[in-house]
Image (spheres, rainbow, N blue to C red):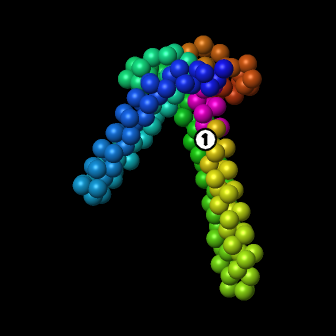
Amino acid sequence: MALKLAFSRIGPVLGYAVISGTIGVVLQALAERLGLLGRLIEATLGLAWTAATFLVVPILAAEGIGPWRAIERSTALLRKTWGENLIGNVGISLVASMISGTVGLIGAGGFMLLFVLDHPMIGTALLLASIATLLLIVLVAAALSAIYAAAVYHYSVAGRPPTSFDGDLIRDAFTRKAT
């Protein structure tokens, strides 16, 4: 059922991929041509693009609209929720980065140490295991991010958290902060 739905939306998803890829290429070209200023522009606009399009994939899957309309809808939902939906994604990225850094240090450091201690086979095995673990961490983080985006989308559209999520946690993510 899920694969059937995904394939039925392949056109809009590919359209969004082309749009997103084009934006990425343009931002990269700015960064290369304008030096430090370009990198600052790329970082700022890249962050804005990421925030504005955070809910595009769940919108494409659930609403069956085109990529431009999905980008507009994602931006509107972002404004509606004050961007609090990004907190979970930042948390997922931060935890995944910390775990990845630790695994990378252990793998690379262990490889070098074992190589120096004349155990290259064990070092190579450790390095390969570290690489496999890093790939697994990336896959799990991507899956968690997609699940979180779908939950945020559901909450922002339905006004209530999905049944499998702690209602207080989801509601708290959308609480507007006093200024």
Residue hosting label 1: 142
Residue 72 visible (yes or no) = no
Locate residue 1, reporting x and y percent. Answer: 66, 20
Residue at 61% over, 14% down: 159
Locate residue 155, reporting x and y percent. Answer: 61, 19
23 vs 76: above or below = below
Quick one: which residue is furthest to the top in this view? 158
Locate residue 41, reporting x and y percent. Answer: 31, 47
Between 140 and 52, the residue placed more toward the observer is: 140
- Give left or right: position of 32 versus 143: left
160 vs 166: above or below = above
Magenta highlight range: 144-152
102 vs 87: above or below = below
How many labels sit on residues?
Answer: 1
Is 147 magenta? The answer is yes
Is 162 magenta? The answer is no
Residue at 43% over, 34% down: 17
Residue 133 visible (yes or no) = yes
Magenta stretch mostly in which secondary structure?
A: helix
Residue type at mark 1 is Ala
Q: How crowded is mark 1: few (under 14 residues within 10 Å), some or many (20 or more)?
A: some
Residue at 66% over, 26% down: 170
